Amino acid sequence: MADPGSTTTAPEINRGLAGLIVAETRLSMVDGTNGRLNYLGYSIADLAQHAQFEEVLYLLWYGELPTRSELDELNGKLTGARKLSTSVMNVIKALPKSGDPIDAIRAGVTAMAMEDPTCHDLSHDAVREKSIRLAGAMPTMLAAYSRLRKDEQPLDPDPSLNTAADFLRMVHGKRQSKTFEDAMNAYLVCVCEHSMNASTFSARVTISTISDIYAAISTALGTLKGDAHGGANQKSMEMLLEIGSPDNADNYVEESLRTHRRIMGLGHRIYKTRDPRVNQLMGHSAKLAEETGNATWHNLAQRLEEITATNQFFLDRKLFPNVEFYSAPLLYMLGMTTDMMPGAFAISRVGGWSAQVLEQLEDNHLIRPSALYTGPESQTYVPIDQRG
Ligand SMILES: CC(C)(COP(=O)(O)OP(=O)(O)OC[C@H]1O[C@@H](n2cnc3c(N)ncnc32)[C@H](O)[C@@H]1OP(=O)(O)O)[C@@H](O)C(=O)NCCC(=O)NCCS
């Protein structure tokens, strides 16, 4: 049968697949008109203010919030997985120090696949167990790589700590304050799941070919790092650093409008109002500014928000702060270098990716769209020596 993409009639092309519904999901509801987000019916505000990241992982993987003993059991598995195998740690150690940290996670995930003899087992329970191992291991990979490139030894995980606290400890070499740990936890909760975003779609495409969960997460990591997606937290912070001070914000916005330069952390394919995660992250950013005694980055983000909220260009296009707007100062004040920020996003989003992979496998259909062929109709092959 002919590929429908090869037809010469001109069907409508949906560039960017905007608005196209390709799956059902019960995991998160994104209401872009009213600025609402929930995970299985729980509002992001409630979860960010009250839940541990691990409770959210349980919710996504098991479909309900855990009891205390269920959470303890999951924590046991997650903390066990936080300790990398020797071969995975050796892969991280062997990587060039000049790369993007999120790519170190990708290498580590591939190494995990290659040492898992049941890599190809796509049964529900097996994929869920692998998801737990991935979510446990990825924070250690990122923390280890961040230390190795400063010529510091990676630290062993501390199973008595939750993901947020232990990740910060493994990055910095010592336990951080409660304000820091709470901010990291809220960040992990806020960015864990977001319906059919680009990286989740990538993960679903990969698993739909009957590949494996590691390959799906690896694909998603590659998609997440782009500037229009998870790489935007890095670009947002680089922009704040370039602007330097709230006093320079007006000029920066004016110059951006004149030169058609995008303000990073602004605009969203779905949200046409303020992203509901912004309030939560802004609150923690403010607390970090107070605790660190340096409010420059938080105040600068606020000033940019004030300026763009009253400018007709941004109002006409419904460009409001997205999740990266305050993630950037938040992660920076937590001591992340700008290039670690997409990786910090990934150690949370792995929860959403893997839960969506499980959903895809429940009723799998190969995801394979079509393209409209616009090349030459027919050409005669000319041997290479006869081509002029
Ligand atoms: C997120 C994003 C990719 C969504 O893009 P999209 O829905 O495809 O929207 P478009 O790229 O078609 O942009 C629509 C219009 O808004 C403008 N626009 C979009 N984001 C803008 C931004 N951050 N700053 C300035 N202008 C922006 C575009 O120039 C375009 O203007 P035009 O109609 O005059 O040509 C886009 O808003 C963006 O690049 N934001 C900055 C990066 C970012 O923060 N990404 C993280 C997303 S969570």
Image (spheres, rainbow, N blue to C red):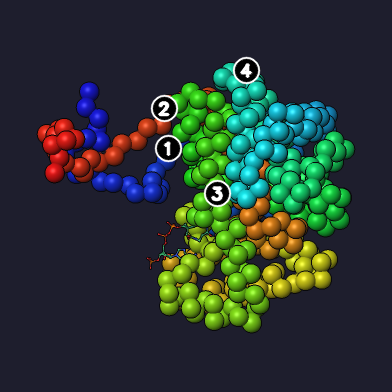
Q: Secondary structure at mark 3?
A: loop
The answer to whether the beta carbon of the residue marked 4 is less than 8 Å from any atom of ligand 1 is no
Q: Which residue is mark 3?
A: 225
Q: Secondary structure at mark 1?
A: loop
Marks 2, 4: nearer the viewer: 4
Where does the image place residue 57, in percent across and percent down from the top left? Answer: 69, 37
Q: Residues within 10 Å of mark 4 (few under 14, many from 20)?
A: few
Write down the residue under mark 2. 366
Three-letter residue code for mark 4: Thr
Please tell me the numbered disc located at residue 118. 4
Mark 1–mark 2 Cα distance, whole angstroms, equals 11 Å
Q: Amino acid at mark 3?
A: Lys
* Label 2 secondary element: loop
Earlier sequence position, callout 3 versus callout 4: 4
Q: Are marks 2 and 4 in contact (CB under 8 Å)?
A: no
The residue identified by callout 1 is 22
Label 3 – label 4 distance at C-alpha = 28 Å
Which is closer to the viewer, label 3 or label 1?
3
Secondary structure of the residue carrying tag 4 is: loop
Counting from the top left corner in percent of width and height, residue 38 is at 62, 46
